[in-house]
Image: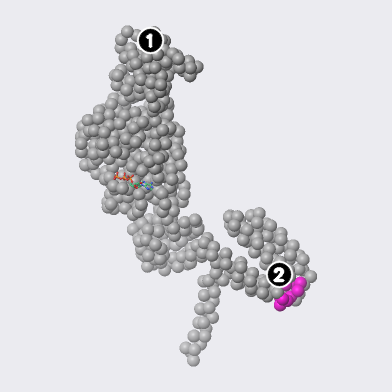
Amino acid sequence: MLVVNDQTSGIPEAVGRWLFRYRSELAPVTAGVGTAATGAMLHANRPGLWWAIALASVAASVAVLRGWFPHRLDRPEERLYAAVTVWVVGSWLAAATALGVGRFPLPWLLVVGTLAAGVPWWAHRRRRARVTVDRTIQAWPDVAESIGLVGSRIVSAVVDVWGWRARVSLRRGQTVADAINRVPAIESGLSARPGAVRVTPDASRADRFTLRVLTRDPHTNPIRWRGPSATSIHQPIELGLYEDAASVRVSFLRRHALVGGIAGSGKSGVLNVILANLAACPDVVLWGIDLKGGMELRPWAACLDRLATSPKEATALLRDGVRELDGRAGELSRRGSRLWEPSETAPALVIVVDEYAELAEEAGEALGYADSIARRGRAVAETLLAATQRPTQRAMGRKAVRSQMDIRVCLRVRERRDVDLVLGQGMLAAGWAAHALDAPGKFLLSAPEADVPQRARAYHVTDADVRASVGRHGSAQPCEEDADVINAEIVEAAPEDGPEAVLIEALRAAPPPGLSATELMRRTGMGRTWVYGRLQEHAAAGRVVQVSRGRWRARPVDDPMAAMAA
Ligand SMILES: Nc1ncnc2c1ncn2[C@@H]1O[C@H](COP(=O)(O)OP(=O)(O)OP(=O)(O)O)[C@@H](O)[C@H]1O
């Protein structure tokens, strides 16, 4: 008897629990039944109210359509659905109030209307996601217990385009590192796909973290590059997109950068994005070192003032980089300033080194120069941008280059411990799981403006994009001018000897595409500042023209543009 009682009391409870659990799915049916009951009640008590109900339903549907309420309906298609539903329900209710719920064809209309309105409701992705989140919040205490985060709570949760995110509060004594170490367990506890969960520390509270569950990977497809985001080194460069579609923006002004990742992880792809932006900045001069025979950087040759493809050239390039640095430092101290502000006439110098490990192996002497630039280059806007597979001590040389890298772009690494190698000690434990990145171009960025491990994917710069960039920003092709017809004024301005005489002679004899500032520095033996200073003065006096970005020559006498400028 006692058993029978237990069973009978258990059935309504189970049904109640089931109804409550599936309340969202049952909402159209509940609304249909509720509307019929209200119609029956109104018809029995206030049948004359039908016109007020009809008017109210029109007013309410207009208000919904205009977005006056409810505010969480932020998409036009959702508002349209809600407005039509309100109007149809209101109209049916008005008819039922006047005529009675049982009058033909009102019952049939109610059934058909409930099903018709139910289909979009049941199919709606955001609603289903919301329901999943609600259920997850309810089930979290059990999940937390089984994954070893007993006592943690979901404080709030929102659904987004790719899944949902929640703020999780930890029990006293638990840390974000505990959650990070349990990411695979969380995925299992939530029955999510492997790789779907992200745990991000909360910068303001050590006992909280953001849990992100991606039902779909936003980075499945390559993201087409949309053109340069910067026209000056003073502006941040957009490297790609985070998983929430926000762009990854980072400033390269006065910062050395390291791009690390296994072969095929997309290092050259990231370098291409950076180069495509820097090439569009007239206040930047680019030098390149590519000891893989120029395979990666040669397509950019026309945008590089110098390209070294052999150990000897690389050593000479970095040695000149140090000379340039010294020249700039001297110039700064003469001016009494602390920082070199890059401009078109005093550009920043960025030295790009593809596969830095080759440099360490084949041009040991060059490492000393690179180290010097890494330590002293920031103030004078002379920086390194290095890519390498594994930035070990051996690959980076015994010098301090790696520790000087302010920007770290970490693509996929093979082993967990390589995360710390690229990003710095302790980063793996802090949740920077670069070993779990699963497609080329996916990366984690550590920089002064990016201190949380958010996955991003670099823009995909195609070969055609590189060609277009080089065509737009590279040196001009030789033109048809007669190189011997030059401005007489520059000849008159020439002193008998000294660097000024060498400079003028070089500019006078320059071929139509002009000479780069680097070449002029080499010929005169003077620093960049001196060369640019002289060029500016001659250009202001109309004696010299800038043929293309960073290339100069004496003004031809029959150059009408130059004559106008003069
Ligand atoms: N952001 C990206 N989106 C999509 N595909 C990319 C992206 N970056 C690179 N890839 C593709 O991945 C492949 C490898 O890229 P990449 O050559 O840049 O890798 P890497 O790390 O420089 O390799 P290696 O060390 O061998 O030079 C290429 O086929 C490239 O097209």
Q: How dense is the environment of label 1, judged by Cα within 10 Å: few (below 14), some, or many (20 and up)?
A: some
Q: Compare residues 160 and 224 and report the one nearer the observer.
A: 224
Q: Is residue 100 magenta?
A: yes
Q: Inspect the image, locate mark 1, and give the three-letter code of the amino acid beneath it.
A: Val
User: From the viewer's perspective, is the residue at label 1 or at label 2 nearer?
Assistant: 1
Among all residues in the image, which is located at the extreme bottom?
Answer: 1
* Residue 71 visible in image: yes
On screen, residue 265 versus residue 36, left or right, reads: left
Measured along the vertical axis of the image, is residue 296 above or below residue 349? below
Query: Residue beneath label 1, please?
Result: 491
Taking the spot 32% from the left edge, 36% from the top edge, the residue there is: 297
The quarter holding residue 445 reads: top left
Taking the spot 34% from the left edge, 46% from the top edge, the residue there is: 266
Measured along the vertical axis of the image, is residue 6 above or below residue 256? below
Q: Is residue 107 magenta?
A: no
Residue 208: percent from left, percent from top: 42, 56
The span shown in magenta is 96-104
Residue 349: percent from left, percent from top: 35, 30
Q: Compare residues 515 and 327 and report the one nearer the observer.
A: 515
Among all residues in the image, which is located at the extreme right?
Answer: 48
Query: Residue beneath label 2, please?
Result: 93
The quarter holding residue 362 reads: top left
- Distance in Å between CA atoms under marks 1 and 2: 96 Å
* Element under disc 1: helix
Q: How dense is the environment of label 2, judged by Cα within 10 Å: few (below 14), some, or many (20 and up)?
A: many
Residue 165: percent from left, percent from top: 46, 57
Nearest to N terminus: mark 1 or mark 2: 2
Q: Compare residues 561 and 108 and report the one nearer the observer.
A: 561
